[in-house]
Image (cartoon, rainbow, N blue to C red):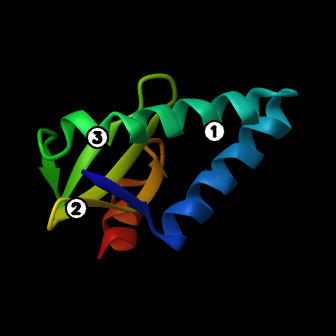
Amino acid sequence: MKIEILDEAENDIVNGMNFYEAQNVNLGNYFLDSILSDIDSLYLYASIHIKTNGYYRLLSKRFPFAIYYKVNNDIAYIYAVLDCRQNPSWIQTRLS
């Protein structure tokens, strides 16, 4: 299984990292490490997560974030990494 993080998802991760770094020094780096660890788990567990809005949704273990991905030809494409505290209609619009 190969994993590809698309540009929009990369921007989501950077925005989340900046948000947490503004809360506390080095918390942004901890967020980044945690999210990347969650994404790495897809090497073993891709396609077992619940499907919502046409995407698989992997919930982060340490932060209130969800990783939305699709699997095609043995490649997991990460489309979005979104804060679960957002308005659900905003999340649905973002994933459309």
**Residue under the point 51% across and 29% down:** 63
- Kindly check if marks 3 and 1 are in contact, taking CB atoms under 8 A apart as contact: no
Q: Quadrant of the C terminus?
A: bottom left
Residue farthest toward the bottom in the current orientation of the protein: 96
Secondary structure state at the residue bearing disc 3: helix
In the rendered image, which residue does mark 2 sit on? 70
Label 2, label 3: how far apart the Cα atoms are: 13 Å
Mark linked to residue 43: 3
* Residue 1 located left or right of residue 30: left
Mark toward the start of the polypeptide (1 vs 2):
1
Q: Nearer the viewer, mark 2 or mark 3?
A: 3
Q: Judge depth for marks 3 and 1 and give the one in front.
A: 3
Badge 1 amino acid: Leu
Mark 1 and mark 2: span between their CA atoms? 21 Å
Whether residue 76 is situated above or below residue 93 in the rendered picture:
above
Q: Position of residue 33 (x, y in %)?
A: 61, 32
Q: Where does label 1 land, which residue?
A: 32
* Amino acid tagged 2: Lys
- The quadrant in which residue 12 appears is bottom right
Q: Are marks 2 and 3 in contact (CB under 8 Å)?
A: no
